[in-house]
Image (spheres, rainbow, N blue to C red):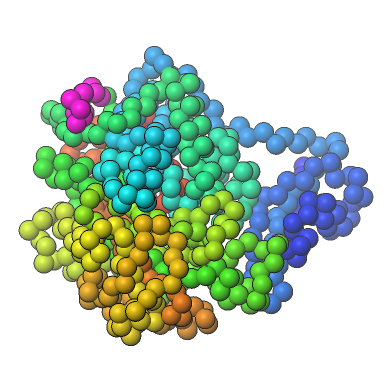
Amino acid sequence: MPITLELKLTPEQAASEDEIKWQAADMARLPLEQIAHLRIVRKSLDARKTQIIVLLKVEIFQPDETFSAELRTFKPLTVSNSKTCHIIGFGPGGIYAALQLLELGIKPIIIERGKDVQERRRDLADINRKLIVNPDSNYCFGEGGAGTYSDGKLYTRSTKRGDIKKVLDVFIQHGANERIGYEAHPHIGTNKLPGIIENMRRTILEKGGEVHFNKRVSGFNIKDGTMKSLLCADGSEFDCQHVILATGHSSRDIFELLNKESILIEAKPFAVGVRIEHEQTLIDSIQYKRMLRGEFLPPSSYSLVTQALGRGVFSFCMCPGGIIAPASTSPGETVVNGWSPSKRNGRFANSGIVVAVNPENWIHLKEHGPLAALQLQKQIEQKAFSATGSIKAPAQRMEDFIQDKLSSDLPDCSYVPGIIPAELSDILPSFISKSLKQGLIDFGNKMRGYRTNEAVLVGVESRTSSPVRIPRDKETFRHPQISNLFPCGEGAGYAGGIVSAAMDGMACANAVNS
């Protein structure tokens, strides 16, 4: 049996494989040559005190012990002639549903409205350079969904919802760095994710699955409570036995189609706010309590939460060394998100700072029924667009926003389409802007130096989660009206990030097989 040890090292020591091995040998009271292999099981950083410590949990193997570095978590079967399951959407939920179906011997047939990752790049370039949004191919729609360009954070608090280790192992088996298997806050990076997603698609195709791009589902053929076929905007039709609906939180046309067909959906709480951007060096100095981070510490992050005027305000998707990206999915709306490359080596740190939106906030839109929360979300995004006349984003210096002052100029910003001075309180509903101001004051008290007029707020961050939930049975995962429909992932209201969406995809695949 391997020996398990917990080491406390300086960042410099933790950066050296030889030093880790030496420290492990010393703690185990073994000669260095008796350690044949060392495996890191867990790595985290304790920066609460001036002396920063790296915590490592390791396993050491002696020469006579069996050691294997091979991952065997994912074991797909060949399914060319097997029974089928159609998956609408090829984001994290849809991809992991497909991979799980392969293990179960079921053929996945994926229908994706957008393009593959290579073709998708051209449309992303058009968003940034020409300010043109393709409603079927953008930062949210296309191979990998929003997950492909959403930074690649693989941290989740949903530890009881599925096999997190398997999700991470599958990423590693398809090209991710093995460190994501042991880091406390694993991260892949937007520059690495597209290639990994392509590898996952190759696995699906090689084992007999199908992936159909540029196929936007525009209708359902339902008879006697069963989904019989899926109709696409190009006139094609797919007969189906089972359907996993994994379209993501921005597929508004799907929500509208479900509502039009009297298929049960419901409005749900979500959150809206802004992206805030600081210099990464400032965040490092606050978090590490030192002026210079040094080469052995990663760019620092933060997680903030408070109650402001009776409403939750919290940071969301914090991106060290990252950029603010355009996340609009239709013309006439402005939406922002954030991501980091694998090295997180950019000049800026950005994070969503958002405010909880609850049912009482969309009661005035009750004529929209279950789409009332969605309608409120759309109105805010359209107002942000109107403030600049394009997807150039309305922006305001942090202290100016708190003091209700239009910024006379703006600092440098990573948002490529560009930012334009605007009063964000004129764009956001008053209940959001008031709570947001108080929340920023609270965060400035928690992190001395965080509140500064050198920070810029960029609007709007509105796609934190789906404003719609598609009901399903807790045990069978089936929709209450349609026996072979399995609502899945973020778009159905059951996940909040890559890992939780992946786990939900696997759970839906298991439900199809039960």
Vertical arrangement, residue 338 with respect to residue 481, above or below: below
Q: How many marks?
A: 0
Question: Looking at this view, is 457 or 69 the one in front?
Answer: 457
State the image quarter where residue 15 is shown.
bottom right
The range drawn in magenta is 226-240
Q: Is residue 61 left or right of residue 337?
A: right
Question: Looking at the image, can residue 462 be seen?
Answer: yes
Q: Name the residue: 32% across, 36% down.
A: 114
Question: Looking at this view, is 315 or 141 the one in front?
Answer: 141
Q: Name the residue: 16% across, 54% down.
A: 371
State the image quarter where residue 176 is shown.
top right
Vertical arrangement, residue 78 with respect to residue 11, above or below: above
Quadrant of image for the C terminus: top left
Residue 159: x percent and y percent? 49, 53
Q: Name the residue: 71% across, 57% down.
A: 56
Q: Is residue 160 left or right of residue 214?
A: right
Question: Looking at the image, can residue 93 be seen?
Answer: no
Q: Is residue 143 magenta?
A: no
Quadrant of image for the N terminus: top right
Question: Looking at this view, is 65 or 501 the one in front?
Answer: 501
Q: Is residue 288 left or right of residue 118?
A: right
Residue 345: x percent and y percent? 58, 58
